[in-house]
Image: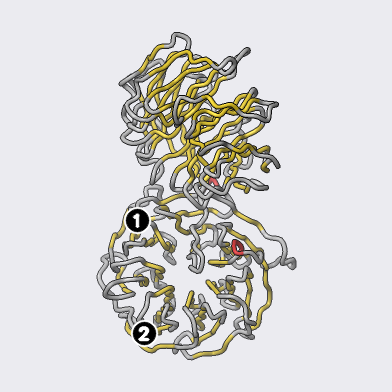
Amino acid sequence: MAYKAGPIYPCNPATARSESTKLGVDPKGEKLIYTNGRAVIIRDLNHTELSHAYTQHTQSATVARFSPSGYYAASADVAGNVRIWDVTNLENNLKLAIRPLSGKINDLAWDGESKRIIVGGEGKDKFGAAFFMDSGSSCGEITGHSKPINSLSIRHQRPFKAISGSDDNSIIFHSAVPFKYDKMINTHTRFVRDVAFSPDGELFASVASDGKLFFYEGKTGDVKGEAGTEGGGSLMACSWSPDSKSIATAGADGIVSIWDASTQKSTQSYTVGTDVQSQQNGIVYAGPNTLVSISLSGVLNLFDTRESSATKWRKLHGATKAITASVLDEQETTFYTGSFDGSIKKFSIGDQEGLCDEIQGTGHSANVVGFSGSEGKVYSAGWDDKVSTIQGDSFSASSLATKSQPAGIASTPNGVYIATSSGIEIHSTGTKSASVLSDGPATAVAAYAQPNSDLIAYGVGKKVILSTVSPEKEIATFEDNKGDVLSLAFTSDGKFLASGDSAGRVILINVEKKEVNVSSRWTFHTGRIVDLAWSKSTKRLASVGLDESIYIWNRESVGKNIAIKNAHPGGVTGVSWLGDDKIITSGSDGIVRTWSVPV
């Protein structure tokens, strides 16, 4: 095999303010399932490198659930599609594809026999549907609501019952099978955010934007009582413990609470924070003593309910938005990623593989367009017209202001070079002033440190210009690219330069001879090439683009390549080499992936 997919470093769930985020867990309580963009993530809570991504949806996925048997997962998207697929193998063989609703699906639920599924959401003619998982044929109706359904649950014991909560403030109790309308429950005065049957089927509960938690009799739907909530914010989600004795709620006030089902009193609570980003959007029990919640910021919080301290818990980080740029540090121990919202994450390579953490301090407030590493530092450029410096796990207090919007960045021990809409900005080490090397708006830049003067290459339209910095002198121009030059990369010895453009063409330039070695043979990309990286041996080049593809080229055998198609849904945005036979990539799906590409 020319290549092999390695471990992935998963993104965290996508969140939105005032919307409940659906979290699911496998029957063993070891793996979390959630969605972000077109990807459905199965995340191992204890071993990140065992996580998996399902990427067969063509629209943004909204909810995913494991079947009670643990053999299948069902996932739904904004267009009303439901896909049921096998989770026991890496190929995720498709069991059923169906479109039960004409609009966004907000939630779905399995019955206790893993045979039937109900879905709810937005639709033109109906807000819910019920069908068999093997044939897709109807097994009843989910009716009675006048506005979109937000949440659903099925009683896993016979006689089956189903409940649905909606934006019309009501809960509909359905008898089954087939599922049909039984009665309406009007306990809440605001949007019903979540409903859930207890695992033993004796009770079910509901939470809503009115901040109230109600308990009901599982077989009849009769109201049993209201928990003593005290004027808090909206309750966004709820989840029962496996023994059915407790229920946990996630609140928009940033508080996770655990309630005793028999006394309807709070027994434990965790205050995640009081700011907007600490709002709790979703929650699920993963085992008897593990509780997982999701903050609006996208951070997953893991609580051990046996701990007496309510101030300490584990946090799982990951990208929550599309990754727009990435870089591997010089020591090959940390992989940095930046997203279009300005957030920057770091992933450990090696001993704690895949462990993700936040970069501390003030970074960017807008799209991160590029990274460059030099002498233990990593520089990041963003559309907030700023270059930040990262050392280890924190930003430096000072940053560089750019004169116009950056498009790319390169660095050496002698300086930082920024491609901007007004030219190349040169920030020499040890000086506070910056000079501008201008020949029009620059779209990409690369730099190589020489004993006397740094050598830089930059793109202006379809041209690649080679120049020395001190003195500023243009030494060669190449016009073999067919589109705007978007990425440039020198080999580690500075002898060769690769150029990638918006037309999907890669050009190989011999820097010493000032001539083009490969002009029209590396043209297999069908979209914009956004990043290039050379292997340590300088013989192999990796190119990635918005066509969702990765290509590995060989400088000594230009007619051969290794193609990795459909690598990241939405496009591949960054690539780095680990030695000569492994690459690490980032993409618009927010996922970091590793690949073995044997020589």
Is 567 placed above or below 151 here? above
Q: Amino acid at mark 1?
A: Gln
Q: Amino acid at mark 2?
A: Ser
Which badge, 1 or 2, is on the more N-terminal residue?
1
How much space separates mark 1 and mark 2, taking CA atoms?
Answer: 32 Å
Q: Nearer the viewer, residue 348 or 378?
A: 378
Q: Closer to the camera: disc 1 or disc 2?
A: 1
User: Which colour assignment does the render follow?
Assistant: secondary structure
Residue at x 68% of width, y 77% of height:
267
Q: Which mark is residue 381?
A: none
Disc 1 designates what residue?
59
Q: Is residue 500 above or below residue 511?
A: below
Residue nearer the viewer, 406 or 160: 406
| 523 lies above or below 390 | above
Q: Position of residue 120 (x, y in %)?
A: 37, 72
Residue 86 in sight = yes
- Which quadrant, please, contains the C terminus? top left
Disc 1 residue crowd, few under 14, some 14–19, many 20+, Cα 10 Å: some
Percent x, y for residue 117?
35, 70
Quarter of the image for the N terminus: give it. top left
Q: Secondary structure at mark 1?
A: loop
The residue that mark 2 highlights is 175
Residue 391 image position (x, y, % from top left): 68, 37
**Quarter-wise, where is residue 155 in the image?**
bottom left
